[in-house]
Image: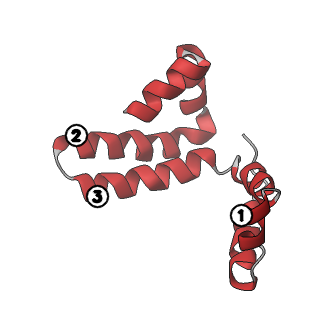
Amino acid sequence: VLFVAGLSFVIGLERTFRFFFQKHKMKATAFFLGGVLIVLIGWPLIGMILEIYGFFLLFRGFFPVVVGFIRRVPVLGYLLNLPGISSLVDKVGESNNMV
């Protein structure tokens, strides 16, 4: 709830509404907001799992930008370039679905 409220304060109500209710993001929005509702009903573990899945679907277009930025940070960039972690980060960072 606080995430959605904070996003609304930062980018405005209209842009937040347009972001969440784009035609190609309806499934992700349903999972995210459904997870919030389930947490409020009283099933926090299931609700949080649904929220995380919805969050991933909503913001997967931003992950390549975030990975590129983190790779330029001195200590974190070194950690992301370690052999086991590098291949996982490359898979997350190669998403071509832009917002």
Identify the mark nearer the N-term, 1 or 3: 3
Q: Secondary structure at mark 3?
A: helix
Instruction: For mark 2, give the secondary structure.
Output: helix
Residue tagged 3: 46
Depicted 78 relative to depicted 69: above or below: below
Amino acid at circle 1: Leu
Alpha carbon distance from label 2 to label 3: 11 Å
Horizontal side, residue 37 vs residue 23: left or right: left
Q: From the image, tell me which residue sits under label 2.
A: 40
Residue in front for this viewpoint, 82 or 63:
82
Residue at far left of view: 42
Quadrant of residue 22 in the image?
A: top right
**Looking at the image, which residue sits at the far bottom?**
83
Residue 17, visible in the rendered structure = no
- The type of residue carrying mark 3 is Ile
Task: Tell me the quarter of the picture where residue 10 sits.
Answer: top right
Is residue 8 in sight in this rendering?
Answer: yes
**Residue where numbered disc 1 is placed:** 76
